[in-house]
């Protein structure tokens, strides 16, 4: 087994042991530990939520007083009392819910294998996630979003820097080393007073 396969297998086994529905849970867990994204009692919007690993981490962090709204075209693989699932397409459907403390997006394209196309679609998804965050976040709120490194990333980062007090690109350890996956971490939304 190659080292990367062993690493991937390691996180998959860890996820299974911890009761997480996907290994992606470790990415948002690491981001939260490093940057302090979640607090008890928050309202969280999870875009591209299925199968639900990020929602699981958020629910644990915000506790029973908080709530998560999870949006995806595909259903989640778990349920919780303070979790509301909305079956929607973020690119096609109007998302008109607001008052969130955190918006997070692990949206990703159906990978075609053609890098230029996949990266372009990923940037479109990230731009849409940022639009939704701008419309949905409370002032002082946080935003975390997946990107594929390449063309368009600097534009999204520049836009985010106008909207948030803190902006950072990071790559969690749970991401594969050869992957172009990055995460945009934004804190302290400056604009909206929802």
Image (spheres, rainbow, N blue to C red):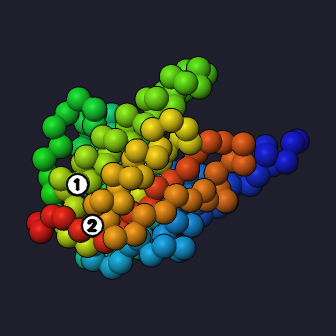
| Label 1 crowd (10 A; few <14 / some 14-19 / many >=20) | many
Residue in the picture at 61% in, 22% down: 113
Nearest to N terminus: mark 2 or mark 1: 1
User: Considering the numbered disc 2 on the image, is that residue within a helix, a strand or a loop?
Assistant: strand
Residue 92 in sight from this viewpoint: yes
Task: In the rendered structure, find residue 76 and report the number of the disc placed on it.
Answer: none
Q: Classify residue 168 as left or right of residue 95.
A: right
Image quadrant of residue 50? Answer: top left
User: Considering the numbered disc 1 on the image, is that residue within a helix, a strand or a loop?
Assistant: helix
Farthest-out residue, bottom: 40
The N terminus sits in image quarter: top right
The C terminus sits in image quarter: bottom left
Disc 2, disc 1: CB below 8 Å? Answer: yes
Q: Residue at label 2?
A: 189
Q: Nearer the viewer, residue 147 or 26?
A: 147
Q: Residue at label 1?
A: 134
Residue 75 in sight from this viewpoint: no
Residue 146, percent from left and from top: 47, 48
Residue 92, percent from left and from top: 23, 29
Image quadrant of residue 54? Answer: bottom left
Question: How many numbered marks, from 0 up?
Answer: 2
Q: Nearer the viewer, residue 113 or 81?
A: 113
Residue in the picture at 28% in, 32% down: 91
Q: Is residue 120 above or below residue 86?
A: above
Q: How far apart are the alpha carbons under marks 2 and 1?
A: 8 Å
Residue 9, percent from left and from top: 74, 48
Q: Is residue 126 above or below residue 67?
A: above
Residue in the picture at 76% in, 52% down: 7
Q: Classify residue 164 as left or right of residue 21.
A: left
Residue in the picture at 62% in, 42% down: 180
């Amino acid at each position: 087994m190659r080292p990367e396969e062993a690493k991937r297998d390691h996180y998959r086994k860890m996820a299974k042991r911890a009761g997480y529905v996907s290994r992606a849970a470790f990415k948002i867990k690491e981001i939260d530990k490093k940057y302090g994204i979640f607090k008890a009692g928050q309202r969280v919007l999870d875009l591209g939520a299925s199968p639900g690993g990020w929602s699981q981490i958020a629910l644990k962090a915000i506790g029973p007083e908080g709530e998560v709204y999870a949006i995806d075209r595909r259903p989640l693989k778990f349920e919780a009392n303070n979790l509301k699932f909305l079956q929607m397409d973020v690119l096609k459907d109007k998302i008109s819910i607001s008052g969130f403390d955190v918006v997070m997006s692990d949206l990703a394209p159906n990978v075609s294998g053609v890098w230029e196309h996949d990266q372009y679609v990923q940037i479109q998804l990230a731009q849409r996630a940022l639009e939704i965050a701008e419309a949905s976040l409370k002032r002082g709120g946080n935003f975390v979003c997946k990107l594929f490194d390449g063309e368009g990333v600097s534009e999204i980062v520049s836009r985010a820097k106008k909207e948030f007090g803190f902006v950072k690109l990071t790559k969690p350890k749970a991401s594969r080393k050869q992957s172009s996956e990055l995460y945009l971490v934004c804190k302290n939304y400056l604009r909206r007073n929802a």
